[in-house]
Image (cartoon, rainbow, N blue to C red):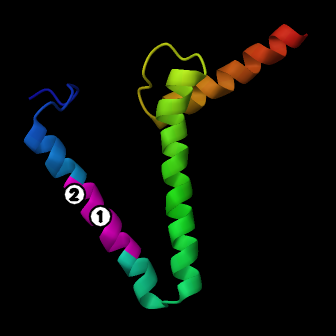
Amino acid sequence: MNLNRDLKSPAALISKGGLFLLLGLVAGGLLLWEIFSLQRLALFAIALWAFCRFYYFLFHVLEHYAGRNRPYAGIFDAVKWILSRKRDDRKRDS
């Protein structure tokens, strides 16, 4: 079995998405279960929204609007590309 190949089965992809949703709901519920307050709920919702927007930024905005001509291999690849651009910009300014 080759674990490096892409997952292409629609059923497996949907199952994987469902498991991520379940994991997020359970983890979020457990975080709020111990000491629930509306303030904690609001802060949790804001943090969740902000991380989702950051993920969208890394994998859509940078690829389609910032000059990246190929998809990213993951979050570390995206961050590495951003940092390399900053180094390239400093070299050009010198």
Q: Which residues are magenta?
A: 18-28
Query: Residue 8 magenta-drawn?
Result: no
**Which structural element holds mark 1?**
helix
The residue lying toward the viewer, choosing from 85 and 56, is 56
For image coordinates 16% across by 47% down, the residue present is 14
Residue 90: assigned label: none
Q: Disc 2 marks which amino acid?
A: Leu
Residue displayed at 18% across by 32% down? 7
Q: Position of residue 72 (x, y in %)?
A: 44, 25
Which quadrant holds the C terminus?
A: top right
Residue shown at 83% from the left, 8% from the top: 92
The residue tagged 1 is 23
Q: What is the crowding at mark 2: few (fewer than 14 residues within 10 Å), some, or many (at least 20)?
A: few
- Quadrant showing the N terminus: top left
Identify the disc placed on residue 19: 2
Q: Counting other residues with Cα less than 10 Å from the Cα at mark 1, is it few (<14), some (14-19), or many (20 or more)?
A: few
The residue lying toward the viewer, choosing from 2 and 48, is 48
Residue contact between numbered discs 1 and 2, judged by CB atoms under 8 Å: yes
Residue 16 in sight in this render:
yes
Mark 2 falls on what kind of element? helix
Q: Quadrant of residue 83?
A: top right
| Residue appearing at x 82%, y 11% in the figure | 91
**Cα–Cα gap, marks 1 and 2:** 6 Å
Tell me if 7 is positioned left or right of 44 in this view. Answer: left
Q: Amino acid at mark 1?
A: Leu
Report whether 28 appears left or right of 55.
Answer: left
Q: Position of residue 31 (x, y in %)?
A: 44, 78
Q: Residue furthest front?
A: 65
Based on the picture, tell me whether residue 23 belongs to the magenta stretch: yes
Can residue 76 be spotted in the picture?
no
Determine the residue located farthest toward the right in the rendered image: 94
37 versus 27 height, above or below? below
